[in-house]
Image (cartoon, rainbow, N blue to C red):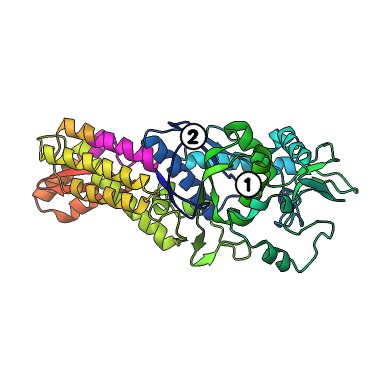
Amino acid sequence: MKLYNTLSRQIDILKPINEPEVTIYTCGPTVYDYPHIGNWFTFIRYDLLVRSLQALGYKTKWVLNITDVGHLVSDADQGEDKLVKQAVKENKDAWSIAKSYTDYFVEGLTRLNISTPDFMPKATEHIQEQIDFIKKLEDNKLTYKTSDGVYFDVAKFPQYIKLARLNLEDQVEGARVEINPEKHRQIDFALWKFSPSEGKRDMEWDSPWGKGFPGWHIECSAMALKYLGPTMDIHAGGIDHIPVHHTNEIAQSEAVNNKPLANIWFHTNHVSVDGKKISKSLGNGITLEDLESRNLPLDALRLLVIQSNYINQSQFTYELMNGAFSSLKNLIRDFSWIYSATGNEINSGELRAKIKKSRKTILDYMADNLNTPRALSTLHDLASYLGNLNSISKEDMEIVENFGHFINSIFGINIVRKINLSKDQSDLIKERSIYRTNKEWEKADNSRLLLEKQGIGLRDVGESSLWFPLT
């Protein structure tokens, strides 16, 4: 497996620490609202990475965290708490908000056929681990305390710039407004924030430094250490995590462990909607329910994600989504007719050779920096070949079935779908064949339309018809 490594700025060969096991940490959701289309692109790409590694023979150990502690809105550790803000909006408490949107997210993973991570740790269930981690930083003289929290002293970690390749002086000069004059540098980040003296927060805990709550970045360092050890093979997230979140993770983790936090940093690029950045102000944070309200199946979303490479900016439009749906229907048609045409063996040797070559080619492309567009092109080429066959032996039908299982395992999309016709549906297909033989075209068309309403498509071959599910 070769992947683009943000740390080295080049495509690197994956060299697992404990082969064949590959350890992966992926930044999960902050559960204060419904994930939008850009979020789901990222989570699907995590899944494609994990599935590809498994298809290549690796044993994966995957952690996807749940940020259910509200961190402050700005990267400068100021502003409103996202969970509290949503709780006020919905007239609930922060705990209820976190549970509700966590449940929704986990359900969304299932709806999108995203593999279940080995661990989905919640920040609220690992407060002690986070406190213990901060203590280690404190013991190493890397922290300082202000009136509003405990901060990491960036000046004491010279390698701070290595992931994002920041110019620290520019960062300092860019901080024109002194948000917190007690901070040594404005890029120093919070490890623990104190609760306000007035009132009580929904989420707050006792600590050696005072009652409060963890900073955003510390949870990932603490949970990664617990579940994967001091160094993991792959750390993944969106590119927006590079300059702040992942940079801060590296600083605090490597300052404690004296080892690289991750050997490969895997970052997915942004998704734009109708050519614009996704934002609440534009109201373009499309959800899964928005897609389903337009009768667009979520398999089609997976296919749309696969059509672009994770390192490039992706585009979402409903036109592209409809195109992905049409492509999905064509794949299902070209692979699923086999159950209606088991008969004489036709080009069996050629068929088996093409399937064998396609499987290897797809694996090769997925191993080459997750080149999903080329892998998908290979699948379409095989589909076109299969779609031009009229009959298939039972043995070859099973080979096509197995190839379909392979595609489902690596892409997460089922393209070989079997339907069991009812007696009425079988009779309707036979009746339509008689209409065609008698050149009663209008009646034949009406029969076809009736079958399509029941989710059954037809492909005419001579005087007979092959059938397949439309979705």
Secondary element at image label 2:
loop
- Report the residue at 10% width, 46% height from top: 463
Spatial CA span between label 1 and label 2: 18 Å
Q: Residues within 10 Å of mark 2 (few under 14, many from 20)?
A: few
Kind of residue sitting beneath label 1: Ile
Identify the mark nearer the N-term, 1 or 2: 2
Residue 86: x percent and y percent? 71, 51
Name the spot of residue 326 as percent of width and height, x first. 33, 55
Q: Which image quadrant is residue 431 in?
A: top left
Few, some or many C-alpha atoms within 10 Å of disc 1 (few <14, some 14-19, many ≥20)? many
Residue 54 position within the rendered picture, expressed as x and y whole percent measured from the top left: 40, 35
Between 246 and 36, the residue placed more toward the observer is 246
Say which quarter of the image contains residue 104. top right
In the drawing, does residue 241 fall left or right of residue 405?
right
- Work out whether residue 122 or residue 462 is closer to the camera in this orientation and state it: 122
| 115 to the left or right of 240 | left
Q: Secondary structure at mark 1?
A: helix
- Kindly identify which residue carries mark 1: 250
Percent position of residue 361, x then y: 27, 45
What span is in magenta?
400-426
Residue plotted at (46% across, 36% down) = 16
In the displayed structure image, the side of residue 297 where residue 360 appears, left or right? left
Observer-nearest residue: 349 or 49?
A: 49
User: Is residue 234 a member of the stretch shown in magenta?
Assistant: no
Q: Is residue 451 visible?
A: no
In the rendered view, would you say 316 is above or below 405?
below
Image position of 201 with respect to 187: above or below: above
Amino acid type, mark 2? Ile
The residue wearing badge 2 is 17
In the picture, the disc for residue 294 is: none
